[in-house]
Image (cartoon, helix red, strand yellow):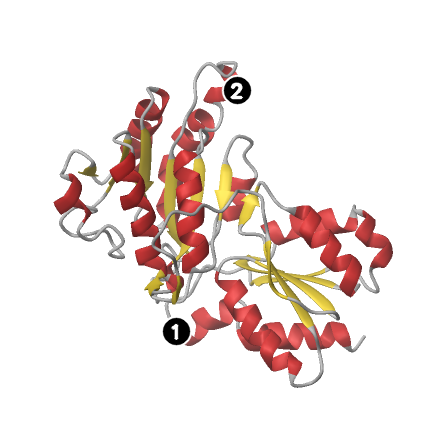
Amino acid sequence: MREITYASAIKEAMVQEMRIDKDVFILGEDIGIYGGSFGVTNGMIEEFGPERVRNTPISESAISGCAVGVAMMGMRPILEIQFSDFVMIAMDNIVNQAAKMRYMFGGKTQVPMVVRLPSGSGLGFAAQHSQSLEAWMAHVPGLIVVQPSNPYDAKGLMKTAIHNNNPVIFFEQKGLYNTKADVPEEEYKIPLGVAEVKKEGTDLTVVATGIMVNRTLEAAEELEKDGNSIEVIDPRTLVPLDIKTIIESVKKTNRALVVYEAVERGGYGAEIASLIGESEAFDFLDEPVSRLGGIATPIPYNPKLEKAAVPQVEDIVKKVKSMMNK
C-alpha cells in the first residue's frame, strides 16, 4: 500500500467526492492557485475550475453564510477556514444557523456542509493562530465534530463527512499535515462515532485526541520499557462519541487518563472523564480518572514556551508513571 501525507489524504477524499458528485465544491480564502495556507487544495482549481474551487473574500462570516445558504438548497459545500481561530468570526452562521436549521424546520431542510479547521499548536504561529477549540463546537447541539489523528482516518472520515446531511466540523491538527501513513487509493469510509483501539494494553487506558494520539503511542512505547502496558484509544469523532469502547477498555485496565491538546480547564477531556465516572466502569476504577491538557495560557510564539504549553511525550510518560505508582 502507498504512503501519503495527512494533507494529501484529505485532498484525495475531496477530489474523489467532487468527481462523483457535482454538488460538492470547496470555498475559502486563497484555496485556488495558491492552494490554501497549508497546500491542501493545491492543484484542485486546475481540475475543477474556479466555480467549484472558489476563492472568497477575507470574510469568514461571508464564507460560512454562503455555505449555509447553498447547503440548504441542496449543495454540499466544504469550507476551508485558514486557521481554526478564525472560526469565531463565523460562529453566528455555524452555531445559530447551520446547527439549528434542520431542527427548527422540522426536518424539512438539511445543512450538509463540512467546515475544515486547521488547528492546534507546534508550528510557531502564536496565540491567535494556534488554538484548539473543539470543546466549543462539541458543546453545540446539531454539530458533528471530527478530529482525525492520522492520514488513513483523515481520508475515511472526510468522505463520510461530505456525505452527511448535517454540518460537520472537521479539525485538522496543523502539525499532522506532513505525517505519512498507508492509505488505500480505493474507496473506503470510516463511520462516525466509532473509536479505534490504536494499541492494546492491560494496565491503564489513555483516551487521546488529535495529535495527542501520536504522542501517546510514543509514550506507551517508552513506558513499556518499565513494564507498563498502556491501552491507547482514539475516539476519532467527539460528536458522536463512542463511549462504549472507552468504557470497556477502562473496565479491563482499571485506570483511565484523558490526554488532549486544548486548555485542560473546560476541555472536552472533562466530558470523557465524566462519562467514564457515570458509567459502569466506575466500579472497576482503582483511582479517579485523570486529565492531561494544555495549561491555561495563550499559546506563546517562543518555541520552548509553545512546547511547554501543551502536553508532550515526556509529560504523558510522567503522568502515567504517577498514576501507576499510587
Residue visible at 27% across and 53% down in the picture: 40
Residue 303 disc label? 1
Tell whether 32 sits left or right of 303.
left
Dot 2: element: helix
Query: Which quadrant: the N terminus?
Result: bottom left
| Nearer-the-camera pick, 39 or 48 | 48
Q: How crowded is mark 1: few (under 14 residues within 10 Å), some or many (20 or more)?
A: some
| Residue with the most extreme right position | 283
* Residue 69 in view: yes
Check disc 2 and report the residue beneath it.
Answer: 103
* Residue 26 in view: no
Residue 17, image x and y in percent?
31, 40
Tell whether 166 sits left or right of 72.
right
Residue visible at 38% across and 57% down in the picture: 184
Q: In this view, does 53 lie above or below 99?
A: below
Tell whether 14 sits left or right of 176.
left
Residue 62, image x and y in percent?
27, 31
Q: Which amino acid does label 1 sit on?
A: Pro
Residue visible at 52% across and 30% down in the picture: 142
Residue 297, image x and y in percent?
50, 60
Q: Which amino acid does label 2 sit on?
A: Tyr
Residue 232, image x and y in percent?
62, 64
Q: How crowded is mark 2: few (under 14 residues within 10 Å), some or many (20 or more)?
A: some
